[in-house]
Amino acid sequence: MSSSPGPVTILLATRNPHKVGEIRAILGDEFRLLTLNDFPGAPKVIEDANTFAGNASKKAVELARWLSTAPPLSGPPCPDYVLADDSGLEVDALGGAPGVHSARFAATGQPGNSPDADNNRKLLRLLTAVPPERRRARFHCVVALTPVARDQVESASPVCYADEFELQTELFDGVCEGRILFEPRGQGGFGYDPLFVPDGCDCTFAEVGEATKNQISHRAKALRQLRFALATRAISHGGSAPAQ
Ligand code: IMP
């Protein structure tokens, strides 16, 4: 749906360099990918929804609205879309925790995320007495894609205006099933990767290597659907489709 010639331009609404690297590797070269580093004035969106979909949509919608109504005067061209991912680990023995709190699992009251090592230590502590057969878990990722309305002026009714962005937001869901080990293994990846063994593997996500993780991960599954949706749209608009 790009109104400009050239590749579809997408703003990745994350400040997590690991996620940016994975998203770039999974989406490939067909898109022009920008990050929040390209838009230093972008508002910081508070992730206070209690679902991955709620947080991903909130980030994508708020940033698309900002780009539409108060586009920066300098910097890169306005993106066609904002892409926001919200993700986390759901552990059955903990009733689905840490879930949407994955990034700040070990934080004790203070704002902001807690270090990965602290989160992993807390997870292992809570699972100390849980036997192997009850250590089922999954990574879950929801990606929200919101088009940036160009030449949009602030509406007299902010409620109706906000709904426009929400209505146009598409969600893509990906899950990777696996289990939690008793101790960390591997140096790659980020977050809970050293504790998570995906089904069908003997290695943790921190051991499998980037290429394998980016084939089978929750993020890869969600982003492949997104890539397919954009490719289908490009065909129906008479443009050339990104390769599958
Ligand atoms: P978000 O940035 O709010 O989506 O937080 C995601 C958090 O979930 C991260 O900080 C990690 O703790 C965890 N997480 C999400 N995806 C992954 C992954 O691919 N590997 C390991 N941890 C992940």
Image (cartoon, helix red, strand yellow):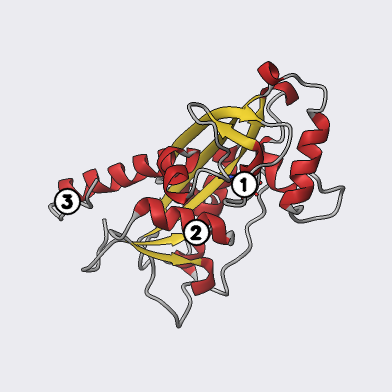
Q: As shown in the figure, which amino acid type bears the numbered disc 2?
A: Val
Task: Determine crowd level at label 3: few under 14, some 14-19, many 20+ residues with C-alpha closer than 10 A.
Answer: few
Q: Is residue 105 visible?
A: no
For mark 1, give the secondary structure. loop
Q: Which residue is mark 1?
A: 186
What distance separates the C-alpha of mark 2 from that of mark 3?
28 Å
Establish if 85 lies above or below 225. below
The answer to which of marks 1 and 2 sits earlier in the sequence is: 2
Residue 168: x %, y % from top left: 39, 46
Establish if 160 lies above or below 2. above
Q: Quadrant of the C terminus?
A: top left
Q: Which residue is mark 3?
A: 237
Q: Residue at x 57, y 74 (%)?
A: 41
Q: Which residue is mark 2?
A: 20
Q: Residue at x 51, y 27 (%)?
A: 199
Q: As shown in the figure, which amino acid type bears the numbered disc 3?
A: His
Q: Camera-side residue: 139 or 203? A: 203
Q: Camera-side residue: 183 or 39? A: 183
Q: Which mark is residue 177?
A: none
For mark 3, give the secondary structure. loop
The answer to which of marks 2 and 3 sits earlier in the sequence is: 2
Considering every residue shown, the one lying at the far left of the view is: 238
Residue 189: x %, y % from top left: 57, 51
Q: Camera-side residue: 191 or 181? A: 181
Q: As shown in the figure, which amino acid type bears the numbered disc 1?
A: Gly
Q: Is residue 50 left or right of residue 30?
A: right
Task: Determine crowd level at label 2: few under 14, some 14-19, many 20+ residues with C-alpha closer than 10 A.
Answer: some
Foreground tag (3 vs 1): 1
Foreground tag (2 vs 3): 2
Residue 40: x %, y % from top left: 57, 74
Task: Determine crowd level at label 1: few under 14, some 14-19, many 20+ residues with C-alpha closer than 10 A.
Answer: some
